[in-house]
């Protein structure tokens, strides 16, 4: 729409009806650009009332701008059109009042009501009524764009701040211009000066795209693609931070390493797509069990790591490990197959078992494999039970494991 506005502006000097038509297309497309931007900015644009609001704004603005172009031939219709600019948004908002409420909806209603009142009061002024009305319409539209963009991007980044400032400057152009023309007629500014806020908005949006891309790249570098959980790099950073916080406060922090048993059997029997779904399922189970202050990470193919922070004791860590294994008791259903997996869990506690992140990981890893080896030596037909590993050189805490119950297929 902005491109159409610039293209139409090039033909405004054409004589007669063609110049008027180009002028109307230019201002109508500029108004439509702002209205469509506001509609695209709201999180509820799929609501039927939002689509009605879009139609009301586009229709009333286009009608009013068309009447301004052919004024004074249709000056009698300006007042009804100005009233519609305020009343139609109110009608749409009230029609969905009990089903839907949002602050941006009422921002639109308030802005258009104020615009409607202003137009009725000033549009028929003999000297500059048409110019005041035209500038008021665009001031309202692009002030609304600034409000919508500020609501959508409430973050202190260069892209957001520049874009928000650009929109408010864009709106201010339609207020400052008439003031300069009325009170400082000797001041002459080139057209490109008035168009500068448009370019500021464009630059700000480009910066926002770059910021979002950088943030997305950073997220991908620190999170597992399959489960969305923190990967090993982010896990190591959080473990070091957790240990440092525990050291400062004199508290404890626990590390749990969870290794799924016979995960390869799931891939070979049901397929890799089932294995992927199983990993996502396990990640969601573990994340739902721990607190928001704790960390669940996928640190290997079928290995998950959990960091449990203050308040945390050794007994609490053991209970969490047992709960995680109980969660895996419930079969995972996938395309007619019932997949039931077990796990080996190794637990290490700071500062009792180790004083740094690397040693804590080694302690938990040794206990996890001690429990896995102990279970592998157990008879296959024995009831499932928790098996304790041999004490490790890093402390007396036991590794816990539940014997793998196997894979069941229900055709």
Image (tube, rainbow, N blue to C red):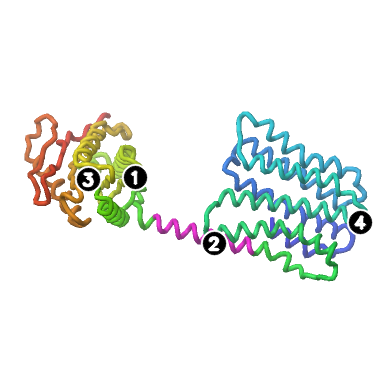
Q: Quadrant of the N terminus?
A: bottom right
- Nearer to us of marks 3 and 1 is 1
Which residues are the magenta region? 200-219
Q: Where is residue 263 drawn, in percent x and y?
A: 22, 43
Q: Is residue 174 magenta?
A: no
The residue tagged 2 is 158
Q: Which residue is mark 3?
A: 256
- Residue 207 magenta-highlighted: yes
User: Is 373 positioned to the left or the right of 105 in the image?
Assistant: left
Q: Nearer the viewer, mark 4 or mark 1?
A: 1
Q: Is residue 261 visible?
A: no
Label 1 crowd (10 A; few <14 / some 14-19 / many >=20) = few
Residue 293 numbered tag: 1
Q: Quadrant of residue 193?
A: bottom right
Q: Quadrant of the C terminus?
A: top left
Decide which of tag 3 and tag 4 comes sooner along the chain: 4
Would you name the residue on which mark 4 appears? Answer: 127
Q: CA distance from mark 3 to mark 1?
A: 15 Å
Could you say where residue 288 lies in the image, as x and y percent from the top left? 34, 38
């Amino acid at each position: 729409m902005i491109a159409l506005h610039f293209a139409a502006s090039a033909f405004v000097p054409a004589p007669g009806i063609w110049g008027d038509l180009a002028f109307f297309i230019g201002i109508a497309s500029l108004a439509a650009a702002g209205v469509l931007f506001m509609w695209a900015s709201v999180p509820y644009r799929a609501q039927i009332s939002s689509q009605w609001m879009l139609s009301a704004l586009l229709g009333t603005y286009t009608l009013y701008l068309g009447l301004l172009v052919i004024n004074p031939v249709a000056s009698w219709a300006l007042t009804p059109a100005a009233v519609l600019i305020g009343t139609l948004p109110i009608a749409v908002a009230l029609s969905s009042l009990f089903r839907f409420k949002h602050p941006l909806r009422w921002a639109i209603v308030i802005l258009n009501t104020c615009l409607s009142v202003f137009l009725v009061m000033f549009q028929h002024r003999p000297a500059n009524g048409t110019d005041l009305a035209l500038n008021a319409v665009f001031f309202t539209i692009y002030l609304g764009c600034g409000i919508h963009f500020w609501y959508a991007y409430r973050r202190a980044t260069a892209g957001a701040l520049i874009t928000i400032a650009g929109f408010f400057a864009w709106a201010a152009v339609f207020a400052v211009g008439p003031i300069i023309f009325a009170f400082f007629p000797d001041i002459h500014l080139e057209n490109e000066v008035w168009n500068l806020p448009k370019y500021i908005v464009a630059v700000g949006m480009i910066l926002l795209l770059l910021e979002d891309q950088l943030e997305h790249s950073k997220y991908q570098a620190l999170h597992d693609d399959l489960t969305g959980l923190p990967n090993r790099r982010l896990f190591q950073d959080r473990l070091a931070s957790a240990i440092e916080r525990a050291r400062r406060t004199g508290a404890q922090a626990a590390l749990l390493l969870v290794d799924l048993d016979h995960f390869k059997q799931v891939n070979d029997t049901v397929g890799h797509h089932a294995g992927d779904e199983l990993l996502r399922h396990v990640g969601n189970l573990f994340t739902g069990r721990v607190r928001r202050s704790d960390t669940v990470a996928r640190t290997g193919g079928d290995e998950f790591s959990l960091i449990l922070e203050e308040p945390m004791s050794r007994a609490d860590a053991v209970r969490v490990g047992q709960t995680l294994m109980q969660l895996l008791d419930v079969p995972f259903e996938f395309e007619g197959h019932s997949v039931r997996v077990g796990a080996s869990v190794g637990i290490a506690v700071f500062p009792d078992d180790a004083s740094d992140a690397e040693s804590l990981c080694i302690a938990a890893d040794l206990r996890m494999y001690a429990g896995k080896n102990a279970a592998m030596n157990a008879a296959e037909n024995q009831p499932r039970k928790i098996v304790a590993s041999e004490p490790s050189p890093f402390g007396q805490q036991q590794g816990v494991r539940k014997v793998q119950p196997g894979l069941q297929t229900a055709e």
